[in-house]
Image (cartoon, rainbow, N blue to C red):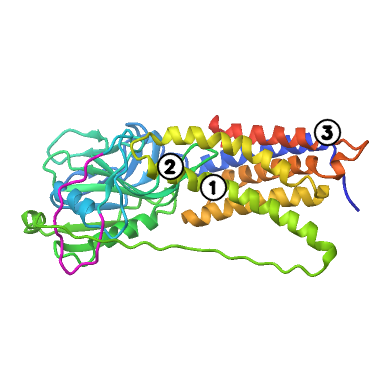
Amino acid sequence: MPIDVRPSTAVTILFVVIAMIAGASIVTAEFSESASPGEPETVTLEDGSELWPYTSREPSTHERTLSINLVVYGDSDVTERALRESTLADWEDVEEDEQDIAPAEEFEIDGNATSTVAWGGADGATRYVYVDPADGTPMWLVESYQLADGDYLGDRRHIRAYNDPGEDDWTAMQAHDEHWDWFHLRHTVHSIEDSQLAVEEEFIDRWYVENLSRDRFGNDDSSDADGWVTIVDLDDRATYLLFAGLLLGSTRAARSFEQGKELWSNDDVQTTVRSLLAVAVLVALYLSIRFGAVGAERLLPERNPKLIVAVFYPILVIGFPIAAYLTTRQLDRAQAFTAAALGFTVAIFLDYTVMGVTTLPLDTVVHRGALAVGIGLIAAGASQTAREPGIEFGYVRTGALLWVVAVTLPLLQFV
């Protein structure tokens, strides 16, 4: 027996969802709370320097963010050049302050190594690291450089590197995987461990690496970090040999997805086709925003990515509800709600799958669920039963209200 959800009930659901989003945000914040105030708990590096093994939004331990997960001992310039010019990933120059950075001078690492393409400079928010040099004054360092592999508006691997402020004898790194979140309009980190493994591979079996190991720093209070930091010791003799030539090539893998469904009776064909069409349109629209923005970013590398966001974001927040409304008008109310909510959910999961995101914060899951409900209510309001004479339950208004509130909350930093 169908159950009609009237506006008063839907509004109640709306406030419950908002409360759940806020609650999930609080829970997430509690789990990611920065370290308690006091002196930074440091680890000792080989030269006697004391390093706080985290990054921070401000020069303070109160704003702790991600764990340092790699330390390279050796000339800092050699380390940077090795990453830029000898990599197992398909890295491209990404702009700092949205201006091109010229690639470093080409050189050869190992004629027998696998083919590679250089890392590129990356644009990202400033993060600080605390260091107490063995023969110096304690200080907060900003990044010496940033490197990235991937697309600003898609997913990318991001490294922040901090050079020894004294003799340039070491480089501390924070590497992580992140993706552009269209609802938060900023990058979201989804893994630290994966990036650590990837950067490790840059130094495995290289002739200029004397030793590679992992050391326990105990900085596991961040994302999926386990507290074990990769330690790379460069061969001192490699410093001048490292600038001999160039190693070319790269590898990249692609994924594809296929899905099929058999329709058994003629009576169900039209409904099934229309439902699948609605789902397909919504999935295609969402993914076209992601891939269209990435394509525009690659086609116009000299443009600030935020200008591309300004073009595609309105398509998402305005075009998506309109598409849900138009594609479900020939369906019954329950079918319309299901098709629209399913289309949004499938699009989200496909988007995250393509970007390699496997874990999400609780507040993000609740937020996406609220958006799916909002889209479903808009579609239910557009359906045949909702447009029959004498039937008006205000689904469109309620769904639009939920959508607007859920879209706005992340921009206000509540999610």
| Quadrant in which residue 379 is drawn | top right
On the rendered structure, is 228 left or right of 405? left
On the rendered structure, is 74 left or right of 291? left
Mark 2 to mark 3 CA distance (whole Å): 44 Å
Residue 55 position within the rendered picture, expressed as x and y whole percent measured from the top left: 34, 41
Most common secondary structure along the magenta stretch: loop
Please, what is the three-letter code of the amino acid marked with disc 2?
Ala
* Residue 133 is covered by the magenta coloring: no
* Between marks 1 and 3 in the image, the one whose residue lies nearer the viewer: 1
Please, what is the three-letter code of the amino acid marked with disc 1?
Ser
Q: Residue 98, which numbered label?
A: none
**Toward the viewer: 276 or 299?**
299
Residue annotated with mark 3? 8
Mark 1 to mark 2 CA distance (whole Å): 11 Å
- Image vertical order of residue 326 relative to residue 190, above or below: above
Q: Residue 296, which numbered label?
A: 2
| Quadrant in which residue 368 is drawn | top right
Residue 320 seen anywhere in this rendered image of the structure: yes
Residue annotated with mark 1? 288
Mark 2 or mark 3: whose residue is earlier in sequence = 3
Residue 215 seen anywhere in this rendered image of the structure: no
In magenta, the rendered stretch is 101-117
Residue 171 position within the rendered picture, expressed as x and y whole percent measured from the top left: 21, 47
Residue 345 position within the rendered picture, expressed as x and y whole percent measured from the top left: 64, 51
For the point 87% across and 35% down, the residue is: 392
| Quadrant in which residue 371 is drawn | top right
Mark 1 or mark 2: whose residue is earlier in sequence = 1
